[in-house]
Image (cartoon, grey):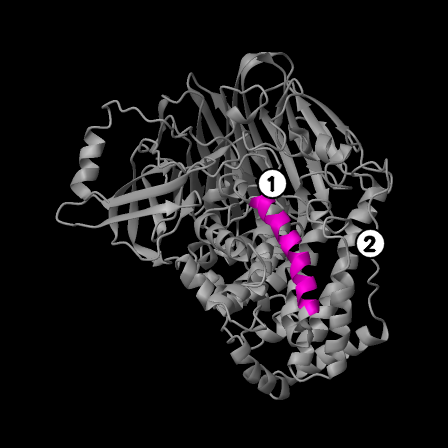
């Protein structure tokens, strides 16, 4: 590499024209693309940096990086990279850097250098260098078993099976005996009949049925084989071998092929690999070769689907588990199957350079809690494999130091409903005890352990996974007394506003979304949407029920802006299930008395708006103020959507009642006036006939078409026997609104700007175009929340 001075000279002379036979593709990343990393002026929290750039077919790569601080001399260069990602094998000094890259073809012709991108490595960045390929491969055991455990640790595990983990071992033996009495069918499952409609209920029965069928067969075999390794009867191993070899006869590109049905193909590949490594000593060389031939075809099929696309476009939902399942195949068949080394190197580069994708380091998950739990539960398998096979500790990553707080803030104990994201509406906090048990143990986090204990004892996973994890150290519990009640997950554009996070039955929660991930994948709800819970009850909800993924109801109702608490224009909503429909949380403040969150989502609409700025002010615990500013290019009618489990009582726009058992929310649309309302319990379209769920949908429509409108809406939250004040005044000035609202323990004054240059004051409460709020208690105490 040229020294640091050479890099500086390059920066200064980059305007000098050069001619290259190959053009470097430096188009900015589009929606659904990972982007150049480190990004310009990014401060990174893991050391060394992960370098990512746009893939170009037929090129190998060179990366240069230099510390750009006076008196310090550190440079880094690497050449002949085959992948368009790179994590160095050594840490860098903290400081300010610049990096660039270029490509070379097979004839030795170079592209020009890329633009130089500055970035910073924080002084407290976590050390996570990536071992070089040869070093990683050399760490994998030469003999079997290789997944979840090393051969040299089997003696210790056998001792545990007789002593500390005897109960777990005996539970495995009982399950193995049940398997022997009722062995799984190993007949190859059927393909879809000709002419069957994709996504139909009969299609779905085969699609998902083949998954569960495959899992029963091969996971039974894996359990039998592992239990035998711990000292179980030889018959367990023989039955495992029989199941393995019969499943090996299945067509590798047939009904359980990865590309034909990945929901069957993925578990086939990793459960087959586990069984193979657990029962390896019982297999003849001929049987081993038959397994290798099958997995060479299946592994190659996965690899060619994932690489190179996943290293630049990593947001395909299923691919975000397929890569580490391919890693399991690669470890099990290390040096036994052609291509396995490349499969593993690819998987490890995904882990180091771009995983996880649906978040940043603050711990959220764009696809929602249901998919977070499902995908992280399975990733934890790979974490176990990496730790044992290669000595890589996944939970050292910055994300995993925060991951459990997503659940703690979104799902306080006893909560019903898991927020935004596919399949989240019916979930309860207790549904997540298992994954939080894993996170608490792996990260040794006392807050997460406290959360687990509020739902009972930590979940002890059964089978060979549970046995292997049984040796993890216990972790003490600590109540979250030292944590704020509300939290922003900036990377996914979601805020959880709470009165407290100890018990949902005594909490009021507002969840708000305005996401840089847009509406893609399973996080499809429109930006600037909100949800409201109070005292254990769902009040204002996201509506619909996923009858089948991508069905008419799922795609035309649940993916639409109409299905959430949001606003449409002449029926037009935000882009459906697309990374391009992006929002952004532009402000967040939290105090024990009040919270404020503001989102901007104007550009997310199918025809972009000049603005859709939604501010939510939470006066704890009884009042939510929602202030919306919308500006369209053409005069439009604006429709304000609200959804509830039960029919809403609408007297007029100032008196709308939402009830769920003994909990209520009274709604007052202070502006604009003359709204007209319609309410229905029908979706458009309704789900398939087998789904009988109906919820209620209220639409408030502006009286005439206009280019700009502001909604000022009050939501008063209480219990049935509670009497809340109803007094409120709204005064419109030239540049904004002055809102005065009575609350049980005092009053609230808010300045809500219409213009960004509005300078105004009410006593000592001042604004310069931003939201300002003051809460005054009856005893004279004053609390202010000013947006700087």
**Quarter of the figure that contains the C terminus:** top left
Residue 1 x/y as whole percent: 24, 45
Q: What element carries label 2?
A: loop
Query: Which of the two discs, 1 and 2, sits closer to the camera?
Result: 2
Q: Which residue is drawn at 66% across and 75% down?
A: 226
What range of the chain is rendered magenta? 286-306
Q: Is residue 667 left or right of residue 21?
A: right
Q: Which mark, by number, is residue 523?
A: 1
Sequence-first tag of 1 and 2: 2
Name the residue carrying label 2.
Answer: 189
* Horizontal relation, residue 12 to residue 530: left or right: left
The reply to whether residue 506 is visible in this rendering is: no
Front position in the image: 206 or 168: 206
The vertical placement of 627 against 3, above or below, is: above
Q: What element carries label 1?
A: loop
Quarter residue 223 falls in: bottom right
């Amino acid at each position: 590499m040229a020294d640091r001075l050479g890099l500086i000279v390059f920066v200064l002379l980059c305007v000098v024209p050069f001619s290259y036979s190959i053009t470097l593709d430096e188009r900015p990343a589009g929606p659904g693309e990972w982007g150049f990393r480190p990004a310009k002026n990014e401060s990174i929290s893991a050391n060394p940096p992960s370098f990512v750039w746009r893939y170009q077919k037929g090129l190998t790569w060179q990366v240069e990086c230099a510390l750009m601080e006076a008196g310090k001399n550190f440079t880094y260069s690497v050449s002949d990279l085959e992948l368009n990602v790179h994590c160095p094998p050594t840490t860098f000094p903290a400081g300010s850097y610049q990096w660039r890259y270029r490509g070379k073809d097979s004839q030795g012709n170079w592209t020009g250098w890329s633009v130089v991108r500055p970035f910073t490595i924080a002084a407290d960045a976590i050390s996570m260098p990536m071992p070089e390929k040869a070093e990683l491969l050399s760490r994998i055991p030469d003999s079997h078993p290789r997944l979840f455990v090393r051969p040299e640790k089997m003696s210790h595990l056998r001792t545990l099976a007789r002593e500390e983990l005897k109960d777990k071992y005996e539970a495995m033996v009982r399950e193995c005996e049940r398997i022997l009495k009722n062995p799984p069918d190993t007949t190859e499952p059927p393909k879809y009949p000709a002419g069957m409609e994709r996504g139909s209920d009969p299609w779905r029965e085969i699609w998902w049925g083949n998954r569960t069928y495959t899992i029963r067969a091969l996971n039974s075999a894996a359990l039998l084989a592992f239990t035998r390794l711990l000292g179980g009867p030889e018959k367990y191993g023989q039955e495992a071998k029989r199941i393995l070899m019969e499943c090996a006869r299945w067509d590798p590109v047939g009904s359980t092929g990865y590309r034909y049905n990945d929901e069957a193909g993925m578990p086939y590949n990793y459960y087959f690999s586990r069984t193979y490594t657990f029962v390896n000593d019982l297999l003849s060389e001929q049987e081993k070769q038959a397994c290798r031939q099958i997995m060479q075809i299946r592994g190659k099929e996965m690899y060619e689907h994932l690489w190179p696309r996943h290293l630049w476009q990593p947001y395909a939902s299923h691919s975000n588990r397929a890569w580490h399942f391919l890693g399991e195949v690669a470890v099990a068949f290390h040096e036994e199957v052609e291509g396995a080394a490349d499969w593993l190197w690819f998987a490890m580069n995904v882990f180091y350079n771009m995983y996880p994708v649906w978040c940043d380091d603050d711990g959220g998950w764009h696809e929602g809690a249901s998919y977070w739990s499902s995908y992280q539960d399975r990733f934890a398998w790979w974490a176990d494999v990496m730790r044992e096979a290669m000595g890589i500790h996944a939970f050292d990553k910055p994300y995993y130091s925060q991951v459990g707080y997503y659940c703690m803030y979104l799902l306080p104990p006893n909560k019903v409903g898991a927020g935004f994201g596919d399949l989240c509406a019916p979930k309860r906090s207790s549904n997540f005890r298992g994954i939080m048990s894993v996170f608490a143990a792996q990260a040794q986090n006392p807050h997460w352990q406290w959360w687990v204990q509020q739902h009972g004892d930590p979940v002890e996973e059964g089978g060979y996974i549970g046995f292997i994890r049984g040796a993890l150290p216990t972790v003490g519990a600590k109540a979250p007394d030292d944590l704020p009640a509300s939290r922003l997950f900036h990377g996914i554009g979601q805020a959880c506003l709470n009165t407290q996070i100890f018990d949902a039955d005594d909490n009021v929660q507002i969840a708000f979304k305005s996401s840089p991930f847009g509406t893609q994948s399973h996080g499809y709800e429109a930006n600037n949407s909100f949800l409201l819970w109070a005292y254990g009850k769902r009040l204002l909800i996201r509506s619909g029920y996923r009858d089948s993924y991508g069905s008419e109801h799922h795609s035309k109702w649940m993916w639409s802006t109409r299905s959430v608490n949001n606003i449409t224009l002449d029926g037009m909503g935000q882009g459906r299930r697309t990374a391009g429909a992006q929002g952004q949380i532009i402000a967040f403040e939290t105090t024990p008395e009040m919270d404020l969150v503001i989102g901007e989502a104007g550009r997310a609409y199918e025809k972009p708006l000049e603005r859709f700025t939604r501010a939510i002010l939470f006066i704890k615990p009884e009042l939510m103020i929602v202030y919306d500013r919308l500006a369209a290019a053409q005069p439009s009618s604006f429709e304000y959507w609200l959804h509830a489990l039960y029919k809403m009582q609408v007297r007029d726009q100032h008196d709308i009642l939402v009830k769920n058992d003994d909990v209520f929310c009274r709604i007052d649309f202070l502006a604009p006036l003359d709204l007209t309302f319609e309410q229905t319990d029908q979706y458009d379209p309704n789900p398939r006939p087998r789904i009988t769920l109906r919820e209620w949908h209220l639409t408030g429509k502006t009286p005439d078409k206009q280019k700009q409108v502001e909604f000022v809406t009050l939501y008063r939250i209480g219990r049935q026997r509670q009497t809340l004040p109803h007094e409120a005044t709204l005064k419109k000035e030239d540049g904004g609104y002055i809102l005065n609202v009575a609350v049980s323990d005092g009053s609230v004054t808010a300045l809500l700007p219409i213009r960004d240059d509005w300078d105004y004051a009410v006593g000592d409460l001042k604004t310069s175009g931003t939201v300002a709020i003051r809460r005054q208690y009856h005893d004279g105490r004053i609390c202010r929340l000013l947006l700087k």
